Image: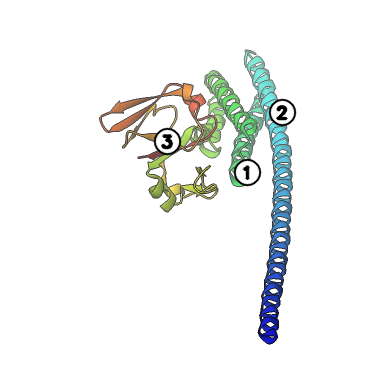
Amino acid sequence: MNYIYTNQNNINMRSILAISLFTIFLAACSSEANQSESKGNNVDLETRIAQLEKENADKDQLINESLEFYTEIQSNLESIELKKDELRIKSTNAELSNDDKQWMLDQIKQINFLREENAKKVTQLNKKLKASDLKIKELESMIEDLVKSMKAKDEQIEMLQAELGSLDKAYSKLFDAYQEKAVLVEELTDELNTVYYSYGTEEELVKNQVIDRKNGFIGIGKKIKLMDNFNQKYFSKIDLTEEKEIFIEGSDLKFVTDHPSSSYNLVNIGKNTKIKIINPHDFWKISKYLVVIVE
């Protein structure tokens, strides 16, 4: 009887010991998991910090380069204005010497050179901004202002060309040469006015690599945004100065990209919707791309 009792005690002790060891093992595993998770979080944080530092460095470099371009273009515009006024004053002289005529031809050549340089610099600046994938609204507005200034200056030069052409066809021909060789400001304007839109169901836009979908905790806090390297081919291209209405096949719309609500109205047409843009400049100010999810 004592033997049975002792044996039972031994079994109980072994059970307690096994449970204790198993509990210690679970605690150790949990500790290692927490340490691993903590280490993983630290690595993710360090990676994110390094990424942000690189983005800031790239942004600073782009801003500095853009300011250099801006200064050079403004300086060229001032030189053009000065030469334009000098040419107009000189052209009022009823008796122009050969030296005067040669001087005027040289000034026209310089004006054309500066105009070409400005057009090329704005093109380079615009390409740099696009290639950087950085959305800096101030720089985009700066480029638009530069293009407007260049276009206004070109209109003044065209008037001067007509005035000088009545004096000597050689002057007008030199201006014509500029029109043939230079990167035209109109092309830059068209590029700046070009915007894009895309719509479809959430599944369609994800499948065609337009939007990126990140789920939150148990479906809560789901985030949908335009992909970083989205599929450009799935967008339609329009001119913001001409197209004021966008027809969408669907009635329940959800905007993925940001567009001020005060800049547009939604008009239901049966089961479809028309986005009526009231203020194109405000509507496309934040994003040149419109992405809409339809139900």
Query: What numbered label is drawn on residue 254?
Result: 3
In the picture shown, does residue 292 fall above or below 46? above
Q: Which mark is residue 75?
A: 2
| Element class at badge 2 | helix
Q: Which of the 4 image quarters holds residue 64?
A: top right
Asked if residue 158 is positioned above or below residue 69 in the image, the reply reads above
Give me the C-alpha separation between circle 1 and circle 3: 32 Å
Q: Amino acid at mark 2?
A: Ser
> Which of marks 3 and 2 precedes in the sequence?
2
Given this view, does label 1 or label 3 mark the residue nearer the observer? 3
Q: CA distance from mark 2 to mark 3?
A: 46 Å
Q: Nearer the viewer, residue 94 or 270?
A: 270
Residue 226, percent across and down?
Answer: 51, 44
Q: Residues within 10 Å of mark 1 (few under 14, many from 20)?
A: some
Name the one closer to the observer, 196 or 258. 258
Question: For mark 1, what is the residue?
Answer: 128
Residue 12 found in image quarter: bottom right
Specify the farthest residue to the left. Answer: 270
Residue at position x 72%, y 43% in the image = 56
Q: Residue at x 60, y 24 (%)?
A: 149
Residue type at the position of mark 1 = Lys
Residue 104 in the image, given as x and y percentages of width and height: 65, 25
Crowd rating for badge 2 (residues with CA inside 10 Å; few <14, some 14–19, many 20+): some
Q: Secondary structure at mark 1?
A: helix
Taking the image as shown, residue 144 lies to the left or right of residue 8, namely: left
The quadrant of the picture occupied by the N terminus is: bottom right
Q: Which mark is residue 101?
A: none
The mark lying in front, picked from 1 and 2, is: 1
Badge 1 or badge 3: first in the primary sequence: 1
Quarter of the image for the C terminus: give it. Answer: top left
The reply to whether residue 97 is visible in this rendering is: no
